[in-house]
């Protein structure tokens, strides 16, 4: 398994326009290109015991990209 960890911050929490839709967290990824810095995800995180929680605006977060080794190629030196 290959992975990369990026730092980010929850910029805002977006309430759904329809109550049946999930709340979203907008996260700004520090190392991303300017045009692609923000991502939006469902605002649900879980701990090691499966307890659910929501992210707060301003929270520092890690964004982890993981890929199976078979999905990667060796980078030239």
Image: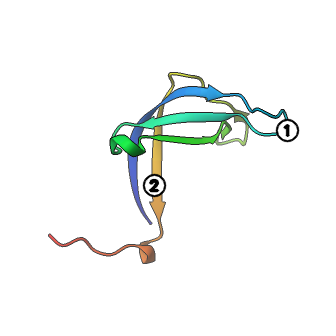
Look at the picture and state if 77 lies above or below 28: below
10 left or right of 55? left
Helix, strand or loop at label 2? It is: strand
Alpha carbon separation for disc pair 2 and 1: 29 Å
Q: How is the image coloured?
A: rainbow
State the mark number for residue 20: 1
Helix, strand or loop at label 1? It is: loop
Mark whose residue sits in front, 2 or 1? 1
Q: Quadrant of the C terminus?
A: bottom left
Q: Are marks 2 and 1 in contact (CB under 8 Å)?
A: no
- The number of numbered discs placed on residues in the rendered structure image is 2
Q: Which residue is the site of mark 2?
A: 65
State the mark number for residue 35: none
**Residue 2: quarter of image:** bottom left
Seen from the viewer's position, the closer of residues 55 and 13 is: 13
Sequence-wise, which precedes: disc 2 or disc 1? Answer: 1
24 left or right of 58? right
- Residue furthest left as drawn: 77
Residue drawn at 55 percent across, 34 percent down: 26
- List x then y, in percent, for residue 21: 79, 40
Residue drawn at 35 percent across, 44 percent down: 32
């Amino acid at each position: 398994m290959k992975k990369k960890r990026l730092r980010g911050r929850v910029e805002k929490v977006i309430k759904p326009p329809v109550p049946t839709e999930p709340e979203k967290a907008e996260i700004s990824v520090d190392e991303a290109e300017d045009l692609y810095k923000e991502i939006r995800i469902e605002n649900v995180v879980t701990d090691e015991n499966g307890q659910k929680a929501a992210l707060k605006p301003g929270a520092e977060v890690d964004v982890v990209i993981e890929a199976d080794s078979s999905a990667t190629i060796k980078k030239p030196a």
